Image: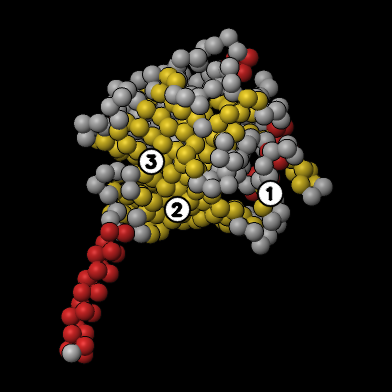
Amino acid sequence: MLGRDLPGKVAVLLSVILCASALQANTQVTKASFGQTPDGTPVDIYTLADGKLEARIMTYGGIVVSLRVPDRKGKMDDVVLGYDSLDKYVANNSPHFGALIGRYGNRIAGGKFTLDGKTYLLPKNDGDNTLHGGPHGFDTVVWKGKAIQNGVELTYVSPDGDEGFPGTLTTVVRYTLEESGLRIEYSATTDRDTVVNLTNHSYFNLAGQGSGDILKHQLQINSSRFTPVDSRLIPTGELRPVAKTPFDFRTPHAIGERINADDEQIRYGRGYDHNWVLDSGGSKLAEAAEAYDPSSGRTLKVLTTQPGLQFYSGNFLDGSITGKGGRVYGKRYAFCLETQHFPDSPNHQNFPSTELKPGEKYHSMTIFEFGTASR
């Protein structure tokens, strides 16, 4: 009896397996050419679409070129700033629109740090500082891409001495659509002691890219402390409580509510351009922040395994950039929520370490999760 029923049971089992597989791989991933760099290197763009979200990611700079999500009425719109062509990304990378940032996201003071008793000098591209890995950081290189389940995997091997950093660093970044969000998983290994701090630099406007400023967006950051900076935007080393300051976003506030406050830190950043010390501590995946646009109803939750979050309110956008669809990007037309280790960590022993040694694996994860609300 059991033997006679076996083929039917096998068929049912196979059907269950196939259905489960289909549920797991419900994202369509397509690849197309996006042009070539000035030296002739081909650049591809991958489109990830699952019927709810659509993300376009190119191999140049690992850039999120577009991210289309629905509003409260179901209308899809692109909520990240960027350009329509590769040429414009190559010609003007200073805003770092949507890019993968490395080897070291954020600022390193004086363009130098000491590791294992040796001082390493880095190219300066932000006054006296090194910003986002230097002038030829990960946002300016062509990554090797391949389609994977629900997304794309990007790989780049940074040679020893690249932009002054020690060690050959092999970095793998996976972008995948997971339920209602874009998941970014970072991994890296090295053959020499080095420092590493990887992030993504997407500029968000939940009302739609180029639609106006983000000052009415509501923002909550799950952080009780931040790292104040000096006039060079370099952390002083202090972990300052946010209580009774314009940096207290433990409950939702409009971004524009206190952005012009009579506060030294606000003046230094020309608004918000600071690192928040996340209450989660970076030990596990946890919610770091949530933004809400009253006009569209779109929400954005940021979950991360990182200990810090750089909130930047687009203060240096000045109307000189024409982005996608001919939209001009004015001051504070977008905000960034960059998950990270703290800026200038190699020069602050009291900050969480960014050192990576041979045999170790750097790993972090960030999820940008979208939804809608009626509030």
Q: Residue at x 54, y 22 (%)?
A: 248
- Residue 303 is situated, as x and y percent measured from the top left of the image, at 46, 41
Placement of 208 over or under 171, stated as above or below: above
- Label 1 amino acid? Glu
Q: Which mark is residue 369?
A: 3
Secondary element type, mark 3: strand
Disc 1 designates what residue? 355
User: Is the C-beta separation of discs 2 and 3 under 8 Å?
Assistant: no
* Cα separation between marks 1 and 2: 22 Å
Tell me the mark number nearer the camera, choosing from 2 and 3: 3
Whether residue 297 is visible here, answered yes or no, is yes
Disc 3 packing (10 Å; few <14; some 14–19; many ≥20): some
Q: Which residue is mark 2?
A: 174
Above or below, 256 against 289 in this view is above
- Which element type, helix, strand or loop, lies under badge 1? strand
Quarter of the view holding residue 67: top left
**Rendered-image quadrant of the C terminus:** top left
Compare marks 1 and 2 and give the one earlier in the sequence: 2
